[in-house]
Image (tube, helix red, strand yellow):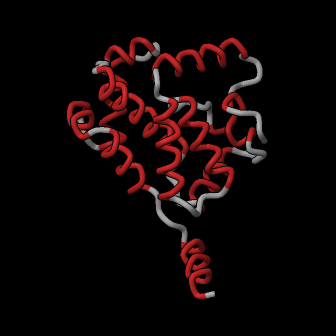
Amino acid sequence: MGRGADYFQPQTSIGAAAHGADHIAHGLGAGSSLVHHLASIIHAALPWLSFPSRAVIDALLLTGGSIGTSELVANRLGLTTRFGLARMLRQDGLPPLHSLSGYITVLRWVWQWEQERTALSRSALREGREPAACYRLVERVTGAPWTSACASGVRWVLSRLLEECERPVGALRVESEMAIT
C-alpha cells in the first residue's frame, strides 16, 4: 500500500485532502506525538490485528477519525463491498467502522480539551459540525456526557475503545500454540 495518510482520501478531492491534513495539524497541534502514542498503545493491546485492520486504525488516528464511507475504505483495501470490510473488522475483534471513527473523534476532542481547554462546541464549529450532534456522539460512543468524558480523560476513552475489542478465538489458539513450542 504505502501511500500514506491520504490513501483513504477520495482521489477526486485533492483540495479536500489538503484541507483535511491542515485541519488535523491545526486540531492536534503538537498532537502527532499523541497519534504515535495512541497507535502504539492500540497495537500493543491488540497484537492479533491483521495488517488491513491496523491500517484502518492508523488512518483513523492520522485523520482524527474520518476516513470516508465504509464503501470507500473497503474499495481502498481491495475488498469488494462494505460488507467485506465489516466482516474483516469483526473477524479481528474490532467494532464497526462508524464506531471506530466515533471513538477516534472523541479521543481527539478530549485530548484537545486536556491540552488547550477547547470547548466541544468550539471544536464542532471549527470542523463545520453541529455542536449538539457532537455532544450526542460523545454520549453514544462513551455512554457518558461530554463533561464526564472530558473529566475522565483520554485514557478513559481509550480504555472504553479497547473494552469493545474482542480477541478472536483463532488468535487465542495461535498464541497458546506459540507459548507451548
* Observer-nearest of 124 and 1: 1
Name the quadrant containing residue 106. Answer: top left
* 79 horizontally vs 104: left or right: right
* 128 horizontally vs 59: left or right: left
Q: Where in the figure is residue 111, as x and y percent of width and height?
A: 36, 31
**Which image quadrant: the N terminus?**
top right
Q: Residue at x 76, y 18 (%)?
A: 12
* Observer-nearest of 132 and 181: 181
Q: Where in the figure is residue 126, as x and y percent of width and height?
A: 43, 12
Name the quadrant containing residue 13. Answer: top right
Vertical comparison of 78 with 118: above or below: below
**Which image quadrant: the C terminus?**
bottom right
Name the quadrant containing residue 120. Answer: top left
Q: Where in the figure is residue 88, as x and y percent of width and height?
A: 64, 55
Q: Residue at x 54, y 53 (%)?
A: 43
Q: Residue at x 26, y 31 (%)?
A: 146
* Observer-nearest of 169 and 98: 169
Vertical comparison of 33 with 46: above or below: above
Q: Residue at x 52, y 22 (%)?
A: 24
Vertical comparison of 39 with 132: above or below: below
Q: How many marks?
A: 0
Q: Where in the figure is residue 118, as x and y percent of width and height?
A: 31, 19
